[in-house]
Amino acid sequence: MVRFVKDQPDAYIYSSFGARIFIGGLLMSLLYITIGIIVYMYADIILSWYTKLFGIPDVPLIGPLMDSILFVTVMFLPLVSITVVISRFILRRTYKKLEQLEIDSKTPQFLLSLARFFFIGCAIATFAPLAMVAESAMNMEIPSSSISYFQSSFMAIFFTLLGIQLFLTMISPIVQLYGRTKSRGLLLAGFLAFIVSSSLIYMANGQWNISIFNLATSEFKSSFGTVMIICGICIFLCFWLVSRDAKSILHYQKMHFTMKLGE
């Protein structure tokens, strides 16, 4: 076994990489499914709870706007931030270990870095217009431009950016492993990543009303909950396929070494 470890040092790292990928994918899929179920079942209760807890005044347009922004901050932003955390502490650390063995991982790391810009874009799309809301409130004016933005454009921008960010994060380990194994299972994993991204983008830009002021409507809750559950299942299957492929490197190299030893 000492000879095997010396000859094939990357196999154990890829096996560890597969275990981390499985855990990260499981956590991410549970997050999407959980948020989908919570929004489907309790969106109206959560919105009314925000009003009571933070003492938001019952002012036309302003009150529902503040409720909705709090809802987005607590329910939607974790979808973005958890994706960044997983890519930071699971994927990037493994790529650094691969670099120590002089294994090229520049392309996957570039994809993760690119995904981070879309995370920043989601935060800017959510909080940047609040400066105009605060300025209008100080001048005792109605922030008509900000209200129009949140009513007609925000959800499309936010979930389009989220879909692109999630796609870049999910294909990062696929790109790394496909150069190593050329497995067809990774092509299926990439297709699942595409389904997740396209589902979020289609939901954001579909024909049904996705205004931030309609978060408690049955139309939004059912559509959002269904999409999140589908995304959660696809995320789990994608990362499971990647994990299985990564672990297979060590398995097949052990078999190859055993056969050579038998000769």
Image (tube, rainbow, N blue to C red):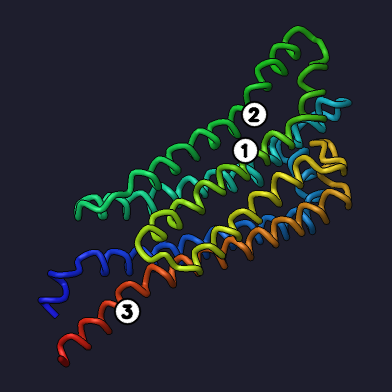
Category of crowding for the residue at label 1, using alpha-carbon neighbours closer than 10 angstroms: few (below 14), some (14–19), many (at least 20): many
Q: In the rendered structure, which amino acid carries the disc numbered 2?
A: Ala
Question: What is the x, y in percent for residue 222?
Answer: 83, 56
Apparent side of residue 238 relative to residue 129 in the rendered image (left or right): left
In front: mark 1 or mark 3? 3
Residue nearest the viewer, comparing 182 with 255: 182
Question: What is the x, y in percent for residue 143?
Answer: 79, 16
Identify the residue at horizontal 69%, vertical 16% (top origin).
134
SS label for mark 2: helix
Asked if the residue at tag 2 contacts the one at tag 1, i.e. Cβ–Cβ closer than 8 Å, the answer is yes
| Residue 80 marker | none
Q: Residue furthest front?
A: 263
Report the quarter where the N terminus lies.
bottom left
Asked if the residue at tag 3 contacts the one at tag 1, i.e. Cβ–Cβ closer than 8 Å, the answer is no
Category of crowding for the residue at label 2, using alpha-carbon neighbours closer than 10 angstroms: few (below 14), some (14–19), many (at least 20): some
For the residues marked 1 and 3, what is the alpha-carbon distance in whole angstroms? 38 Å
SS label for mark 3: helix
The earlier-in-sequence mark between 3 and 2 is 2
Report the quarter where the C terminus lies.
bottom left
Query: Which residue is under mark 2?
Result: 125
For the residues marked 3 and 2, what is the alpha-carbon distance in whole angstroms? 46 Å
Q: In the rendered structure, which amino acid carries the disc numbered 1?
A: Leu
Apparent side of residue 112 relative to residue 40 in the rendered image (left or right): left
Question: What is the x, y in percent for residue 250?
Answer: 30, 74
The earlier-in-sequence mark between 1 and 2 is 2
| Residue 161 marker | 1
Apparent side of residue 183 relative to residue 227 in the rendered image (left or right): left
In front: mark 1 or mark 2? 1
Residue nearest the viewer, comparing 113 with 248: 248
| Residue 251 marker | 3
